Image: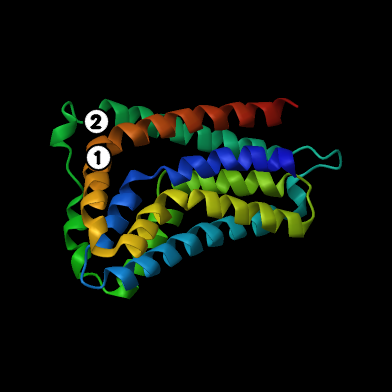
Amino acid sequence: MGHVLGDVLGFAAGVAVSPLPIIAIIIVLATPRGRLNGVVFAAGWVLGLSGLGTVMLLVGGQESATSHGQPATWVGALKLALGVLLALLGLKLWRHRPADATQAQLPKWMATIDRFTPVKVFLLALLLSAGNLKNAPLTIAAAATISSSGLPVGQQIGALAVFVVVASVGLLAPLAVFLVMGERARKTLGNWKEWATRHNTAIMAVLLFVFGLKLLGDGIDVLSS
């Protein structure tokens, strides 16, 4: 199980560094119902990653590993396809990054978050976790790695749980700061938001490209073995 966790933790770290979702929860925490909405957002995020990972484990089943304990061919093909997708998206983002980071702007929909009900906050968190162009492929790749490991079901669930916990660290950090410090956290979180806004595109581009290359390598390794 140790080897599987080693691979999975890398993907989890990629998900944890998610500037846009971190900015979103900071905005949520600044709303009048920040404490409630922040917890709801975190719950939606965790459920989104857990749900997507669980679906992938169920789809993979026991057919993800051969009788020799090697990943099945389709796992290699999946990782290869995800790698190409992420690498191309990374290159595209890098080419279109703002020339001046101080001029970076947030998506227009973020200006309406302060009017979101808890239900909308929950749905937004689901979308940013399970529907994000970076997080969804990395979660799928992590679950494919777990399902193709040949581990017993219980250990596969445990590995997925570890992935979700680590992948949520970046998002839970602002929530923890807010819950501990209350109103005193506003300045700190505001600085985090400003930094993440400025560097969101560059960070996303680099992460997409790096993990795209990793998945390309993993896919080629599976298909050639």
- Drawn side of residue 110 relative to residue 177, left or right: left
Secondary structure category for the residue under label 1: helix
Counting from the top left corner in percent of width and height, residue 114 is at 20, 65
| Distance in Å between CA atoms under marks 1 and 2 | 15 Å
Counting from the top left corner in percent of width and height, residue 190 is at 21, 50
Q: Nearer the viewer, mark 1 or mark 2?
A: 1
Tell me the number on the disc at residue 195.
1
- Residue at image mark 2: 97
Amino acid type, callout 1: Trp
Tell me the number on the disc at residue 173.
none
- Drawn side of residue 213 relative to residue 116, left or right: right
Q: In the displayed orientation, state which residue is furthest to the right.
A: 67
Look at the image and name its color scheme. rainbow
Counting from the top left corner in percent of width and height, residue 113 is at 22, 63
Residue 44 location, quadrant? bottom left
- Drawn side of residue 54 relative to residue 149, left or right: left
